[in-house]
Image (cartoon, helix red, strand yellow):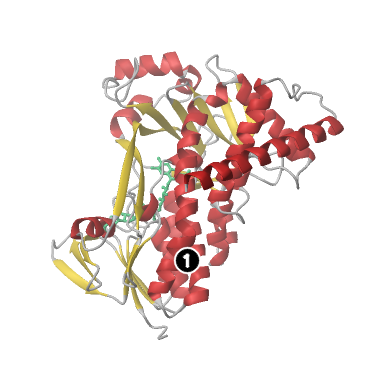
Amino acid sequence: MDKKDNILIIGGGLCGSLLALRLGQRGYNVQVYEKRSDLRKVDISAGRSINLAFSDRGNKGMKLVGLEEKVKSLCIPMNGRMIHDANGKTFLSPYSGRDYEYINSISRGGLNALLLDEAEALDNVSISFNNKCKEVDFVKTTATFQNYHSREEFTIQADIIIGTDGAGSILRKSYYLAKKFLFSFSQNYLTHGYKELSILPDKHGTYKTYKNALHIWPRGDFMLIALPNLDGSFTVTLFLSYEEGRYNLNNLNNPKIVNEFFKKEFPDALELMPNLIQDFFDNPTSPLGTVKCAPWHYKGNTLLMGDAAHAIVPFYGQGMNASFEDVVEFDKILDDHEGDWEKVFKAYEKTRKLDTDAIADLAIDNFHEMKDHIANPIFQEKRKLEIALEKNFPAEYSSKYSLVTFNEHIGYHEALSKGRAQDKAILNMLADRAIPPTTDLKKEELRKILLKVKAETKEIIDEDRIAKTMKN
Ligand SMILES: Cc1cc2nc3c(=O)[nH]c(=O)nc-3n(C[C@H](O)[C@H](O)[C@H](O)COP(=O)(O)OP(=O)(O)OC[C@H]3O[C@@H](n4cnc5c(N)ncnc54)[C@H](O)[C@@H]3O)c2cc1C
């Protein structure tokens, strides 16, 4: 194959910039067209997921392009969830019983800028900003853009086009509207939306609360979370229903009621947020949804990747990580089938879709876990037991969270099947009092519990397999 194939990437966000860098490193001629201004020159973050949880699957992408060390300097390790209960008490629930397993808070802008810098440093990669894609003709492999400043429209022809243009993808819309092939598409919104707020640094420029954790204020039907930034601040996100409940996003429409809500539900957070009212009314309220679609490609001409193919709700902290893993998986498939784009796209979708569907479902599970279950005593007992199992038998046990977040060598689908079965096994055993309280258990007793959990998990997985075979 002529390695000089021209590849057009629509969207220079997290996935598009990593993809451009990797394809550039492989020798392709890559052009990226991005709708927004260059974020390295203009601050465009205002109120939209300023920082993100970055973990091992995302890091595979950084290793692939040789950026692991540079990215480390952007990361703040978060070892666990700092739970703030309704009485203002806090406790740290570690993410894993293995000390070396933690997630990181990373700035979206900082990471995106690094990827853009590295991609642009290659002679065969060009990135052009302020050009919004209006439409893609996937049969002719052309895309039409409009320049933000001149308002002029222009069309670009490429050998292949990859749409990494996020949850509202124009390439995906073009598949849907053209009706030239059987394109399935679903979009499901949560009844909850989100609003970003902040905890600013104290007068010495340091963190007002514990730095190395993801803070959560779970309140059953809604929650507040906070992730640290390098400058001593935290980005805080309120997840709340638009319509339901005494307080909701629709009726929090004046400073008095916002203050009343925070005073009642999050008094300890409010103390750290004298800027609450300004943030609340300056920042947008945004919806949260899951997008699934298929196929992701049209012949060997065009392909969807990242959120454009599989947007998910943010509760597992995996959307960006999954999009980076997309690039890693795509790169592996290229090793096998380089030279035949249709084969590459088909093989990629075949291996990847099962996993991205799984993380979409896991992310919804975690929505309920974070806002509600983590405050529940039986759930806390389960977490205690899992941490003890991970600490005492590091090679033998991984919780669902660990399987998803730290076991990057297995796919999300495998993590989901095993993780859900383990959860069910442990919760059933705790409810039936078949497991004693974890506190003060000796290693031999824990070993017995581990064996029980494993046997029960296997039984549940086998039953699920039989049920599936019967359905088919
Ligand atoms: C509140 C929130 C919190 C999140 N937290 C986490 C987290 O903790 N961890 C995690 O892993 N993920 C998280 N995510 C998910 C993560 O943000 C996405 O999965 C990730 O950004 C996907 O990358 P992407 O490049 O596919 O899409 P995007 O980052 O959305 O990038 C798409 C790019 O395409 C550009 N574009 C869009 N339309 C056009 C067009 N018509 N023409 C040209 N360019 C276009 C956009 O301007 C943008 O630059 C979170 C998401 C939200 C909403």
**Residue 470 seen in the figure:** yes
Q: Is residue 9 left or right of residue 425?
A: left
User: Considering depth in this image, is 331 or 258 the residue closer to the camera?
Assistant: 331
- Residue 213 percent location from the top left of the image: 58, 35
Q: Is residue 407 left or right of residue 193?
A: right
Residue pictured at 52% horizontal, 36% vertical: 205
Q: For the residue labelled by badge 1, is the local secondary structure a helix, a strand or a loop?
A: helix
Residue pictured at 56% horizontal, 26% vertical: 374
The quadrant in which residue 34 appears is bottom left
User: Considering depth in this image, is 24 or 171 the residue closer to the camera?
Assistant: 171
Residue pictured at 62% horizontal, 19% vertical: 377
User: Considering depth in this image, is 67 or 39 the residue closer to the camera?
Assistant: 67
User: Considering depth in this image, is 289 or 274 the residue closer to the camera?
Assistant: 289
**Residue 103 seen in the figure:** no
Residue pictured at 59% horizontal, 29% vertical: 82
The quadrant in which residue 5 appears is bottom left
Q: For mark 1, what is the residue? A: 330
Q: Name the quarter where the N terminus is drawn.
A: bottom left
Total numbered labels: 1
- Amino acid type, label 1: Phe
Q: Is residue 472 above or below residue 385?
A: below
- Residue 344 percent location from the top left of the image: 43, 71
- Residue 15 percent location from the top left of the image: 42, 58
